[in-house]
Image (tube, rainbow, N blue to C red):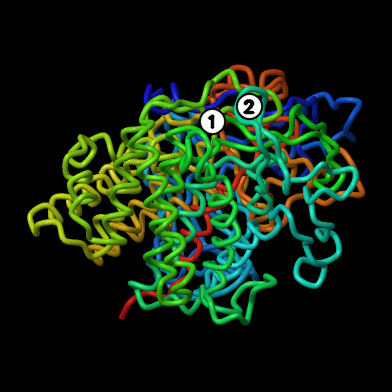
Amino acid sequence: MFPHVHRRRPTNRRTTGAGTASAGRRGAAGLLTAVLLTGGLALAPGAAGAPSAAAPAAADPAAATTPVRVNQAGYLPDGPKRATVVTTATEPLNWQLRSASGATAASGRTVVRGVDAASGEATHVADFSSFRKTGAGFVLVVDGWSSAPFDIRADLYDGLRSDALAFFYHQRSGTPIEASLVGPAYARPAGHLGVAPNQGDTNVPCQAGVCDYTQDVRGGWYDAGDHGKYVVNGGISVWTLVDSFARAKRAGTASALGDSTQRIPERGNGVPDVLDEARWELDFLMRMQVPEGKPYAGMAFHKIHDAAWTGIPTRPELDPQPRELHRPSTAATLNLAATAAQCARVFRPYDAAYAKRCLSVARTAWTAAKANPELYAPDSDSTGGGPYNDTQVTDDFYWAATELYAATGERAYRDAVTSSPWHTSADALTPTGFNWADTAALGRLTLATVPNGLSASDIRRVRASVTAAADGHLATMAGQGYAVPIPANGYVWGSNSQVTNNAIVMATAYGLTGQQRYRAGVLESMDYLLGRNTLDLSYVTGYGDTYAKNQHHRFWAHQYDASLPNPPAGSLAGGPNSGLQDPVAQEHLAGCAPAACYIDDIGSYSTNEVTINWNAPLAWLAAFTAERPRG
């Protein structure tokens, strides 16, 4: 495992809960023990976990899987179309692509790939990319075994573009979630506005010894499966959504994210809907700034959450816990500086007054962070919410400086960029990707794509670092049976977000160069998330023949309470985590291969939670992959 990821990733940061193996035809594939049949295909029998008293037993998944692993949602007509076949056969096997009527549409021979290190499976690859016709209900047949059905169509990702972004409206705090926008199953009253039994977020005191006043910190997004709101995770998430729009605008495709493209209350206000959604979080982030005249003025409180963990299920409006502000931190302050500066740049054409306010907040936060450069959030602060501790913030300084420079062009911020060791470091873009604790890559991506005053040679070097990192991800994919853009030792907490963030690097390289290999890498990364993986499971709710649907969450908790829904379509599960950092994973997944360390159980918070910083890059990629090809 790469130390820079492991040492800074929060562990055991959620409540525990016993659970069951997942329901569904292939939903418990994370429990499968591969049986490789010599000279033939492997069909893995299932092993369902024992149910707890709190949840109903899951359906028996024993007959659930197939050795022919595909993107279960489908493929784009002009994109790569590859499947992984689990088999110990030493010679190529015949494959047939069959239409819904059973007719053979294409055929060929597999390529022997050998053992995939992350899954431990012997694999072949079937490549039917040359087939470019469209249709629904295709299956790939290899030596008598059939894949899950899938489509081939140009509008494949249009629905996911909307659903992945809609996740954020569902997660909003401090506002009712309207049935007219999300349907009756997901509608709920506003949470944490002080209506009993809530104690509210409009007048929140600090933890003992932190401050002697209260703050209005309403709004924002609930971070994950809990009711906490964390500035550093909010920062990377809002940056990603705003960057998604900025990228689409550069590509001339921003209308797909424009006004009235989403079902949100702000539609029709003349502002692109993705920016309206980001603003819900930006407003909260700015409310977390310490007021003028108070100790640490200009800095940002690190987080706000319940004084103790709430149980599952607990709907937000029924949460009775007192809420607390936690000590300001340098990392949170720099997140505020970076995202507020990005706001100033991207919102300016749509709301100049708001952009001006954002820039003022960003400047104040930058100054406060420079005055308090080593105020770290403690890793022990994990009662009622995750610590999100981070003792290396030079990368956050670099990110904030790049955003302030991109927004203003001012020499002081340029000097902060060019004097940072991260400006030339090879570690800004790593094989395991970036995350809330490793943010130098965000600065690098901004400098590579946003016009700025750096020298031509410096811009060439920055852009070359992005394409080099993208080439590294492609090389990693090429060496695997499942073409995943993380190394075999990269299956950590939230591994699916490492996949999506590395895919963003490849998509950015495509935007810089127009070279199709980068777009192909993004599409194959989506293949992995949507079913071409060792579990034969889509990690995105509502997409694919069999998908994750029991993600760890306080109010999308159908597994524990039949009156509550499963997560809405477009919700991304955290994914395989070889650390097994929750009791359910420890009980059911001991000895798992890294890529198989996942269980679709609401109690497995270390493999199966949803969070804003995992769905944000999914939304970014869905918007990218939904675009029709150039030319």
Q: Secondary structure at mark 1?
A: loop
Label 1 environment density (alpha carbons within 10 Å; few <14, some 14–19, many ≥20): many
What is the CA distance from the residue labelled 2 to the residue labelled 1? 9 Å
Label 2 environment density (alpha carbons within 10 Å; few <14, some 14–19, many ≥20): some
Q: Looking at the image, which is closer to me, 321 or 362?
A: 362
Mark 2 vs mark 1: give the one in front.
1
Q: Which mark is residue 420?
A: none
Residue 464: percent from left, percent from top: 17, 51
**Figure quadrant of residue 487:** top left
- Locate residue 557 relative to residue 288 in the image: left or right: right
Q: Earlier in the sequence, mark 2 or mark 1?
A: 2
Q: Looking at the image, which is closer to me, 397 or 222?
A: 397
What quarter of the picture does the N terminus occupy?
top left
- Locate residue 89 relative to residue 536 in the image: left or right: left
Residue at point 76%, 28% (across, down): 309
**Figure quadrant of residue 584:** top right
Residue at point 78%, 41% (across, down): 554
Q: Confirm or deny contact between disc 2 and disc 1 (CB under 8 A).
A: yes
Q: Looking at the image, which is closer to me, 375 or 515?
A: 375
Q: Which residue is mark 1?
A: 388
Residue 615: percent from left, percent from top: 57, 51
Q: Is residue 167 above or below residue 490?
A: below
Inspect this view and state whether residue 544 appears: yes
- Most distant residue in the front direction: 293
Q: Which residue is mark 2?
A: 13
**Figure quadrant of residue 199:** top right
